[in-house]
Amino acid sequence: MVNSLVSILIPFKNVEDYFEECLKSIQNQTYKNWEVIAVNDNSSDNSLQIANRFAAKDDRFKIFSNEESGIITALRKAYQNSNGKFISRMDADDHMTKDRIKVMVDSLLNEGQGTLAVGKVKYFSKAGVNDGYDRYEKWLNKLTATGENFKEIYKECVIPSPCWMVHKEDFDKCGAFTPNRYPEDYDLAFRFYEYGLKCIPCSTTLHYWRDYDNRTSRTSEHYAQNYFLDIKLHYFLKLEFKSNDNLVVWGAGKKGKTIANSLVEKNIPFHWVCDNEKKIGKDIYGVRLEHYSVLQNTEKTKCIVTVANEEDQISITSFLKELNLKPAVDYFFFC
Protein backbone atom coordinates (compact mmCIF):
# COMPACT_ATOMS: atom_id res chain seq x y z
CA MET A 1 0.00 0.00 0.00
CA VAL A 2 3.03 2.28 0.11
CA ASN A 3 2.66 5.00 -2.53
CA SER A 4 -0.97 3.98 -3.12
CA LEU A 5 -3.10 5.99 -5.52
CA VAL A 6 -5.16 8.79 -3.98
CA SER A 7 -8.36 9.93 -5.72
CA ILE A 8 -9.16 13.62 -5.16
CA LEU A 9 -12.78 14.34 -6.06
CA ILE A 10 -13.64 17.89 -7.14
CA PRO A 11 -17.10 19.07 -8.21
CA PHE A 12 -16.81 22.52 -9.76
CA LYS A 13 -19.12 25.26 -11.00
CA ASN A 14 -18.26 28.84 -11.96
CA VAL A 15 -14.99 29.10 -10.04
CA GLU A 16 -12.78 30.58 -12.76
CA ASP A 17 -11.32 33.17 -10.37
CA TYR A 18 -9.95 30.51 -8.02
CA PHE A 19 -9.72 27.17 -9.86
CA GLU A 20 -6.19 27.51 -11.18
CA GLU A 21 -4.83 28.18 -7.69
CA CYS A 22 -6.69 25.12 -6.42
CA LEU A 23 -5.33 22.80 -9.12
CA LYS A 24 -1.79 24.15 -8.79
CA SER A 25 -1.85 23.40 -5.08
CA ILE A 26 -2.59 19.78 -5.94
CA GLN A 27 0.01 19.68 -8.69
CA ASN A 28 2.61 20.91 -6.19
CA GLN A 29 1.95 18.15 -3.64
CA THR A 30 5.00 16.37 -2.25
CA TYR A 31 3.05 13.11 -2.61
CA LYS A 32 2.85 12.46 -6.35
CA ASN A 33 0.66 9.36 -6.81
CA TRP A 34 -2.74 11.00 -7.05
CA GLU A 35 -5.50 11.52 -9.56
CA VAL A 36 -7.94 14.41 -9.73
CA ILE A 37 -11.46 13.49 -10.80
CA ALA A 38 -13.03 16.87 -11.54
CA VAL A 39 -16.68 17.07 -12.58
CA ASN A 40 -18.05 20.17 -14.25
CA ASP A 41 -21.47 20.92 -12.76
CA ASN A 42 -22.88 23.04 -15.60
CA SER A 43 -20.44 25.94 -15.38
CA SER A 44 -21.22 29.02 -17.46
CA ASP A 45 -17.77 30.64 -17.09
CA ASN A 46 -14.25 29.50 -18.03
CA SER A 47 -13.92 26.87 -15.28
CA LEU A 48 -14.09 23.94 -17.71
CA GLN A 49 -11.43 25.47 -19.97
CA ILE A 50 -9.12 25.86 -16.98
CA ALA A 51 -9.63 22.23 -15.99
CA ASN A 52 -9.06 21.01 -19.55
CA ARG A 53 -5.86 23.02 -19.78
CA PHE A 54 -4.43 21.22 -16.75
CA ALA A 55 -5.61 17.85 -18.09
CA ALA A 56 -3.90 18.46 -21.44
CA LYS A 57 -0.52 18.83 -19.71
CA ASP A 58 -0.91 16.32 -16.86
CA ASP A 59 -2.84 13.08 -17.32
CA ARG A 60 -3.44 12.83 -13.57
CA PHE A 61 -6.22 15.37 -14.11
CA LYS A 62 -9.38 13.69 -15.43
CA ILE A 63 -12.31 15.89 -16.36
CA PHE A 64 -15.96 14.88 -16.64
CA SER A 65 -19.31 16.63 -16.99
CA ASN A 66 -22.36 16.21 -14.80
CA GLU A 67 -25.34 15.12 -16.90
CA GLU A 68 -27.59 16.10 -14.00
CA SER A 69 -27.30 19.09 -11.67
CA GLY A 70 -26.06 19.59 -8.14
CA ILE A 71 -23.07 18.79 -6.00
CA ILE A 72 -24.25 15.34 -4.91
CA THR A 73 -24.67 14.00 -8.44
CA ALA A 74 -21.34 15.59 -9.42
CA LEU A 75 -19.63 13.85 -6.50
CA ARG A 76 -21.23 10.55 -7.46
CA LYS A 77 -19.93 10.92 -11.00
CA ALA A 78 -16.45 11.70 -9.67
CA TYR A 79 -16.42 8.71 -7.36
CA GLN A 80 -17.70 6.34 -10.04
CA ASN A 81 -14.70 7.28 -12.19
CA SER A 82 -12.09 7.07 -9.43
CA ASN A 83 -9.48 4.33 -9.03
CA GLY A 84 -7.72 5.24 -5.81
CA LYS A 85 -7.03 3.16 -2.72
CA PHE A 86 -7.66 6.32 -0.72
CA ILE A 87 -10.53 8.76 -1.31
CA SER A 88 -10.41 12.49 -0.62
CA ARG A 89 -12.45 15.53 -1.58
CA MET A 90 -11.44 19.06 -2.49
CA ASP A 91 -13.34 22.31 -3.06
CA ALA A 92 -12.54 24.04 -6.33
CA ASP A 93 -12.23 27.48 -4.75
CA ASP A 94 -9.77 26.50 -2.01
CA HIS A 95 -6.14 25.38 -1.92
CA MET A 96 -4.20 22.83 0.10
CA THR A 97 -0.80 22.90 1.74
CA LYS A 98 1.94 21.09 -0.18
CA ASP A 99 2.13 18.20 2.31
CA ARG A 100 -1.59 17.63 2.80
CA ILE A 101 -1.86 14.43 0.78
CA LYS A 102 1.32 12.95 2.25
CA VAL A 103 0.28 13.72 5.83
CA MET A 104 -3.11 12.10 5.32
CA VAL A 105 -1.77 9.04 3.51
CA ASP A 106 0.84 8.49 6.22
CA SER A 107 -1.86 8.78 8.89
CA LEU A 108 -4.10 6.21 7.21
CA LEU A 109 -1.20 3.82 6.62
CA ASN A 110 -0.14 4.09 10.26
CA GLU A 111 -3.63 3.63 11.69
CA GLY A 112 -5.14 1.18 9.18
CA GLN A 113 -8.74 0.76 8.14
CA GLY A 114 -11.59 2.05 10.27
CA THR A 115 -9.97 5.49 10.50
CA LEU A 116 -10.50 8.92 9.02
CA ALA A 117 -7.70 11.38 8.29
CA VAL A 118 -8.55 15.03 8.92
CA GLY A 119 -6.52 18.22 9.21
CA LYS A 120 -6.73 21.69 10.63
CA VAL A 121 -8.19 24.38 8.36
CA LYS A 122 -7.62 28.09 7.94
CA TYR A 123 -10.26 30.47 6.59
CA PHE A 124 -9.15 33.37 4.43
CA SER A 125 -10.96 36.16 2.61
CA LYS A 126 -10.13 39.44 0.90
CA ALA A 127 -12.82 41.11 2.98
CA GLY A 128 -11.64 39.49 6.20
CA VAL A 129 -13.10 36.46 7.97
CA ASN A 130 -16.25 37.19 9.98
CA ASP A 131 -16.61 36.26 13.64
CA GLY A 132 -18.86 33.28 12.93
CA TYR A 133 -16.35 31.58 10.64
CA ASP A 134 -13.50 32.47 12.97
CA ARG A 135 -15.26 30.79 15.91
CA TYR A 136 -16.08 27.76 13.76
CA GLU A 137 -12.45 27.45 12.65
CA LYS A 138 -11.15 27.56 16.23
CA TRP A 139 -13.79 25.10 17.46
CA LEU A 140 -13.18 22.67 14.59
CA ASN A 141 -9.39 22.81 14.88
CA LYS A 142 -9.54 22.18 18.62
CA LEU A 143 -11.51 18.98 17.97
CA THR A 144 -9.21 17.95 15.13
CA ALA A 145 -6.09 18.33 17.28
CA THR A 146 -7.35 15.61 19.63
CA GLY A 147 -9.36 13.53 17.15
CA GLU A 148 -12.50 14.03 19.25
CA ASN A 149 -14.53 15.50 16.39
CA PHE A 150 -17.54 13.24 16.79
CA LYS A 151 -18.11 14.21 20.43
CA GLU A 152 -19.73 17.44 19.26
CA ILE A 153 -21.25 16.30 15.97
CA TYR A 154 -24.75 17.53 16.86
CA LYS A 155 -23.48 21.10 17.24
CA GLU A 156 -22.08 21.61 13.73
CA CYS A 157 -20.35 19.73 10.92
CA VAL A 158 -17.23 18.31 12.59
CA ILE A 159 -15.51 17.06 9.43
CA PRO A 160 -14.36 19.83 7.04
CA SER A 161 -15.84 18.84 3.68
CA PRO A 162 -12.68 19.55 1.62
CA CYS A 163 -10.16 18.18 4.13
CA TRP A 164 -10.58 14.49 4.84
CA MET A 165 -9.25 11.20 3.47
CA VAL A 166 -10.45 7.64 3.98
CA HIS A 167 -9.79 4.08 2.83
CA LYS A 168 -11.99 3.24 -0.15
CA GLU A 169 -13.35 0.16 1.65
CA ASP A 170 -14.46 2.29 4.60
CA PHE A 171 -15.96 4.89 2.29
CA ASP A 172 -18.08 2.24 0.60
CA LYS A 173 -19.25 0.89 3.97
CA CYS A 174 -20.42 4.39 4.86
CA GLY A 175 -22.52 4.67 1.71
CA ALA A 176 -20.21 6.99 -0.24
CA PHE A 177 -22.37 9.65 -1.94
CA THR A 178 -25.52 7.54 -2.21
CA PRO A 179 -27.94 9.59 -0.03
CA ASN A 180 -29.76 12.58 -1.51
CA ARG A 181 -29.56 14.51 1.74
CA TYR A 182 -28.26 18.07 2.11
CA PRO A 183 -26.00 19.47 3.42
CA GLU A 184 -24.15 16.53 1.90
CA ASP A 185 -20.94 17.11 3.89
CA TYR A 186 -22.79 17.05 7.22
CA ASP A 187 -24.69 13.93 6.22
CA LEU A 188 -21.42 12.22 5.30
CA ALA A 189 -19.90 13.23 8.64
CA PHE A 190 -22.81 11.57 10.43
CA ARG A 191 -22.31 8.39 8.39
CA PHE A 192 -18.61 8.34 9.26
CA TYR A 193 -19.75 8.62 12.89
CA GLU A 194 -22.49 6.00 12.48
CA TYR A 195 -20.05 3.41 11.15
CA GLY A 196 -17.58 4.04 13.94
CA LEU A 197 -14.67 5.52 12.01
CA LYS A 198 -11.98 6.95 14.27
CA CYS A 199 -10.70 10.45 13.55
CA ILE A 200 -6.90 10.54 13.53
CA PRO A 201 -5.65 13.55 15.55
CA CYS A 202 -3.83 16.20 13.51
CA SER A 203 -2.16 19.36 14.77
CA THR A 204 -1.15 20.65 11.32
CA THR A 205 -3.01 23.09 9.07
CA LEU A 206 -3.58 21.24 5.80
CA HIS A 207 -6.26 23.27 4.05
CA TYR A 208 -6.99 26.91 3.24
CA TRP A 209 -10.73 27.51 3.10
CA ARG A 210 -11.81 30.51 1.04
CA ASP A 211 -14.78 32.59 2.14
CA TYR A 212 -16.62 34.95 -0.20
CA ASP A 213 -20.14 36.25 -0.66
CA ASN A 214 -21.35 33.88 -3.40
CA ARG A 215 -19.80 30.69 -2.03
CA THR A 216 -22.30 27.83 -2.35
CA SER A 217 -22.55 27.28 1.40
CA ARG A 218 -23.66 30.91 1.73
CA THR A 219 -26.11 31.08 -1.18
CA SER A 220 -27.71 27.66 -1.73
CA GLU A 221 -30.99 26.88 0.04
CA HIS A 222 -29.58 23.40 0.70
CA TYR A 223 -27.35 24.90 3.40
CA ALA A 224 -30.09 26.80 5.23
CA GLN A 225 -30.46 26.24 8.98
CA ASN A 226 -33.56 24.03 8.68
CA TYR A 227 -31.59 21.49 6.61
CA PHE A 228 -28.98 21.23 9.36
CA LEU A 229 -31.67 20.70 12.01
CA ASP A 230 -33.37 18.04 9.90
CA ILE A 231 -30.11 16.08 9.60
CA LYS A 232 -29.36 16.41 13.31
CA LEU A 233 -32.78 15.13 14.31
CA HIS A 234 -32.72 12.36 11.70
CA TYR A 235 -29.48 10.89 13.01
CA PHE A 236 -30.30 11.57 16.67
CA LEU A 237 -33.48 9.51 16.38
CA LYS A 238 -31.63 6.82 14.43
CA LEU A 239 -28.46 6.55 16.51
CA GLU A 240 -29.10 7.90 20.01
CA PHE A 241 -32.79 7.58 20.87
CA LYS A 242 -34.44 4.37 22.07
CA SER A 243 -38.18 3.78 22.38
CA ASN A 244 -38.00 3.51 26.18
CA ASP A 245 -36.06 6.78 26.58
CA ASN A 246 -37.68 9.89 28.01
CA LEU A 247 -37.01 12.40 25.29
CA VAL A 248 -36.52 16.01 26.37
CA VAL A 249 -36.22 19.19 24.32
CA TRP A 250 -34.58 22.03 26.28
CA GLY A 251 -35.27 25.49 24.87
CA ALA A 252 -38.24 27.21 23.27
CA GLY A 253 -36.51 29.55 20.86
CA LYS A 254 -36.63 29.19 17.08
CA LYS A 255 -34.54 25.99 16.99
CA GLY A 256 -36.39 24.47 19.92
CA LYS A 257 -39.72 25.13 18.27
CA THR A 258 -38.51 23.65 14.98
CA ILE A 259 -37.34 20.47 16.71
CA ALA A 260 -40.52 20.27 18.79
CA ASN A 261 -42.74 20.71 15.76
CA SER A 262 -40.88 17.95 13.91
CA LEU A 263 -41.31 15.57 16.85
CA VAL A 264 -45.03 16.34 17.02
CA GLU A 265 -45.36 15.64 13.30
CA LYS A 266 -43.54 12.32 13.82
CA ASN A 267 -45.86 11.45 16.75
CA ILE A 268 -42.87 11.10 19.10
CA PRO A 269 -43.76 12.08 22.69
CA PHE A 270 -41.34 14.32 24.58
CA HIS A 271 -40.97 16.70 27.52
CA TRP A 272 -40.40 20.33 26.59
CA VAL A 273 -38.51 22.37 29.18
CA CYS A 274 -37.05 25.86 29.56
CA ASP A 275 -36.38 28.53 32.19
CA ASN A 276 -38.49 31.29 30.62
CA GLU A 277 -41.27 32.13 33.06
CA LYS A 278 -43.33 33.70 30.25
CA LYS A 279 -43.40 30.37 28.37
CA ILE A 280 -43.61 27.84 31.20
CA GLY A 281 -47.14 26.44 31.41
CA LYS A 282 -48.02 27.42 27.85
CA ASP A 283 -49.07 24.92 25.18
CA ILE A 284 -47.23 25.10 21.86
CA TYR A 285 -48.00 22.54 19.12
CA GLY A 286 -50.10 20.76 21.75
CA VAL A 287 -47.15 20.31 24.12
CA ARG A 288 -47.00 22.05 27.51
CA LEU A 289 -43.73 23.75 28.40
CA GLU A 290 -42.35 22.84 31.83
CA HIS A 291 -39.64 24.16 34.11
CA TYR A 292 -36.39 22.28 33.60
CA SER A 293 -36.43 21.13 37.24
CA VAL A 294 -38.83 18.33 36.20
CA LEU A 295 -35.73 16.51 34.93
CA GLN A 296 -34.82 15.79 38.55
CA ASN A 297 -37.60 13.20 38.52
CA THR A 298 -37.04 11.90 34.98
CA GLU A 299 -35.27 8.62 34.30
CA LYS A 300 -33.63 7.35 31.12
CA THR A 301 -33.29 10.89 29.85
CA LYS A 302 -32.22 11.72 26.30
CA CYS A 303 -32.04 15.50 26.11
CA ILE A 304 -31.74 17.73 23.05
CA VAL A 305 -30.45 21.15 24.11
CA THR A 306 -31.27 23.95 21.63
CA VAL A 307 -30.06 26.90 23.74
CA ALA A 308 -27.32 28.81 21.89
CA ASN A 309 -26.13 31.26 24.55
CA GLU A 310 -22.71 30.07 25.78
CA GLU A 311 -23.24 31.15 29.41
CA ASP A 312 -26.60 29.38 29.47
CA GLN A 313 -24.98 26.27 28.00
CA ILE A 314 -22.47 26.23 30.87
CA SER A 315 -25.31 26.45 33.41
CA ILE A 316 -27.29 23.74 31.63
CA THR A 317 -24.25 21.47 31.50
CA SER A 318 -23.65 21.97 35.23
CA PHE A 319 -27.27 21.14 36.04
CA LEU A 320 -27.29 18.00 33.89
CA LYS A 321 -24.00 16.80 35.37
CA GLU A 322 -25.52 17.10 38.85
CA LEU A 323 -28.13 14.62 37.64
CA ASN A 324 -25.28 12.29 36.58
CA LEU A 325 -26.15 12.71 32.93
CA LYS A 326 -23.29 12.32 30.46
CA PRO A 327 -22.53 14.58 27.47
CA ALA A 328 -22.89 12.94 24.03
CA VAL A 329 -24.60 10.00 25.79
CA ASP A 330 -27.56 11.43 27.72
CA TYR A 331 -27.64 15.01 26.45
CA PHE A 332 -26.67 16.60 23.14
CA PHE A 333 -26.21 20.23 22.18
CA PHE A 334 -27.88 21.01 18.86
CA CYS A 335 -26.23 24.45 18.58
Image: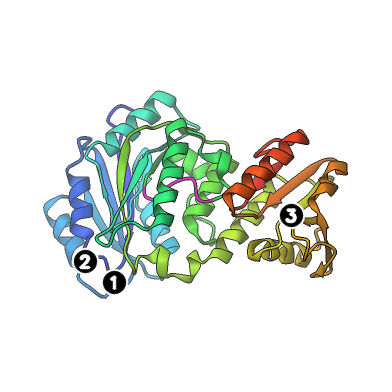
User: Disc 3 versus disc 2: distance between alpha carbons?
Assistant: 45 Å
Q: Is residue 203 above or below residue 54?
A: above
Task: Look at the magenta stretch and give its main secondary structure.
Answer: loop
Pointer 2 local density, CA inside 10 Å: few below 14, some 14–19, many at least 20? many
Which residue is the site of mark 1? 43
Dot 3 or dot 2, earlier in sequence = 2
Q: Position of residue 169 (x, y in %)?
A: 47, 38
Residues rendered magenta in the picture: 156-162
Q: In the orientation shown, which residue stands out farthest toward the top?
A: 110
**Residue 150 visible in the displayed image:** yes
Q: Is residue 132 above or below residue 190?
A: below
User: Disc 3 versus disc 1: distance between alpha carbons?
Assistant: 43 Å
Residue 283 falls left or right of residue 88: right
Q: Is residue 201 above or below residue 25?
A: above
Q: CB of mark 1 within 8 Å of CB of mark 2?
A: yes
Query: Which mark lies nearer to you, 3 or 2?
Result: 3
Pointer 3 local density, CA inside 10 Å: few below 14, some 14–19, many at least 20? many
Dot 3 or dot 1, earlier in sequence = 1
> Looking at numbered disc 1 in the image, what kind of residue is underneath it?
Ser
Q: In the orientation shown, which residue stands out farthest toward the left?
A: 57
Which residue is the site of mark 3? 249
Residue 100 falls left or right of residue 203: left
Which residue is the site of mark 2? 16
Model colouring: rainbow
> Looking at numbered disc 2 in the image, what kind of residue is underneath it?
Glu
> Looking at numbered disc 3 in the image, what kind of residue is underneath it?
Val
Q: Position of residue 139 (x, y in %)?
A: 46, 44
